[in-house]
Amino acid sequence: MKMKKTAIEWTIGAAAVLAAVGCATFPDAQETRGTAESMVKASFTAPTPNLLKRLDQDRAQQICSKIGKAELTPAEAAEVVKLSRASIEYPKSGKFAGNWKAGAKLAYDGGGDRIQGGRLEKRAHNGGLCQNCHGLEAGEVNVGNVGPALTGYGARGNSEAIAKYTYERIYNAWTYFPCSNMPRLGATGHLTPEQITHLVAYLIDPQSSLNRK
Amino acid sequence: MFTLRSRIAVLALICLFAPAAGAQNAGAGLEVGRKMLLEDNPGELWIDRGKRIFHEKRGPKKASLEQCDFGMGPGNLKGATARLPRYFADTDKVEDLDSRIVTCMVTLQGSDREQVKKSAIGRPLTDGSDIEAIAMYVASHSNGMKMDVRLDHPKEREMYKAGEYLFFRRSGQTDFGCVTCHGQPDKRIRLQDLVNMLDKKQIQAVAGSWPAYRGAHGISRTMQWRLYDCFWQMRLPELAYLSDVSIALSTYLNYQGNGAVVKVPGFKR
Amino acid sequence: MAEPMRIRATLQGDVADVRILMRHPMETGQRKNPKGEIIPVHFIQSVVVTHNGKTVFDAQWSQAISRDPFLGLRIKGAKAGDKVSVTWTDNKGDKRTDEATVAASS
């Protein structure tokens, strides 16, 4: 005897199928954050537990991880600026501009502090990474453009005020441009205050190869 | 010495006219060079290598991978990778191409999972790993077809949303997230053009290009390696092979790249 | 060593468009390993291509040719079904010969 499905049975069947397919929704933002952060905790290895902390976000990074077209609110921007200003550590020497030749070496150095095969690429000092994103000396071909070209930066002068501003921009770029693409090189500890003074000199010293025509 | 990098640099120099405008003009010259490198690239030799390994009886069970199910049914390779990553009922997980190869090496061939994962990413300037070759072979069966990742299963949706979140997540001493380098148009690091993953056309241009022959390494590379390498230079800890983060990011990116025509082997610098 | 080549030969009119991919490290002898030792020179020295047994291409290569080299050439007076054979020999005496049949234009 052939059984004809009743309307109810069809509805229940269809609902079951729809539920299985999960036609309902995608996980919401909060659930997603929870899932993703758990994934982060379980998806990486490092030579020491301390190095795993590199994956932890500080408050400013959390704010600056806007998804899609979400924008920074004025309050958030202000908070990032405040945190950034507070993070700035000035050089012990009191001089913002160091040695431009040392700065030139640093600017072209993209190495240091990476983790591979269970080992940390530890060197005496990390590279400045500048050349990856910024055009530096005039006439170069091998230049990135993630950041603005810095060729001839010294044209704006080398006063104390400019030296200080330049130092702060490199130490923590988010002081002036919250959530900028530029790494907060000093604040995160990638570069030391002394290293940053050399980069400042590289940028503002009139003798620097960066400012040569 | 004739490295790939020096060849590209020479090509760029040849294509420049005004030194002052050099940086801007480099792009056009590089594009010509890139097209030349992509056609008939050595990655095709990994299709052949992968085919040999795929059909060999290996492992404790002395079996080939011929019965492996990449989503289109056991043994059916055509169009399979165009749909990856996707949910698999037998493992109750969302899996990408690498993951599925490992699953089959374990279940069909009886290999040890941890051993297989350990040797999954080959060393540069060697023959590369078996998985890298197999991946190239399997992916070649989707050539000419459009990427068509679906988000039907709740786990696929979960992976997609997590991947999106992770794409924008900034951390570490570089404050980098994927978006830092891959979220704007017309950007490059030194002479390496950066794909803007937030631009449909741009991501479609690359989504179908993996696995690829990585010139500097001289071997086939998969997306698992590519993601690992990104985290390496971001000064972050090592991304574990087949980790949830890797699957989530692949799911997000491949879905964004839907519509891309698969064309492997790709060619990367 | 000596992995198989990939040879594609397609007819375009009466010209066979031949594309060959070879697997070879093409070591220049200038690179150093992580220990600082020179990696010995290892490269394809000669490539010979024949068309139905007749030599149509005979080249002497040097270290300047890059790793996993690609060679493209065109052979006039070809017909579908013709045999194209490629042989490379390297400085260590390793040899590899592979063959392909000229395919009609698609």
Image: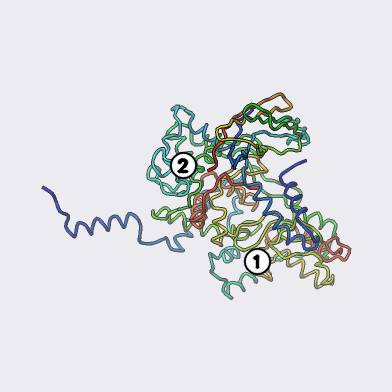
Between residue C24 and residue A132, name the one nearer to us: C24
Label 1 environment density (alpha carbons within 10 Å; few <14, some 14–19, many ≥20): some
Q: Position of residue B53 (x, y in %)?
A: 52, 32
Q: Which residue is mark 1?
A: A180
Checking the image for residue A110, the label placed there is none
Q: Residue at x 53, y 69 (%)?
A: A70
Q: Pick whichever, A140 or C8, lies toward us.
A: C8
The amino acid marked with disc number 2 is: Arg
**In-image side of C73 versus A39 (left or right):** right
Residue A181 pos. (x, y %): 65, 63
Q: Foreground residue, B245 or A61?
A: B245
Taking C19 as reference, is A199 above or below it? below
Residue at position x 43%, y 56% in the image: B157
The amino acid on which the numbered mark 1 sits, given as a three-letter code, is Ser
Residue drawn 61% across the image and 34% down it: B127
Q: Splitting the image into 4 quarters, where does residue B186 fall?
A: bottom right
Q: Nearer the viewer, mark 2 or mark 1?
A: 2
Task: Look at mark 2 in the image and give the residue it sits on.
Answer: B100
Furthest toward the bottom, the residue is A74
Give the Cα distance between marks 2 and 1: 39 Å
Extreme residue toward the right, this view: A207
Q: Locate residue B25: give its quadrant.
A: bottom right
Q: Is residue B17 visible?
A: yes
Element at badge 2?
A: helix
Q: Chain of mark 2?
A: B
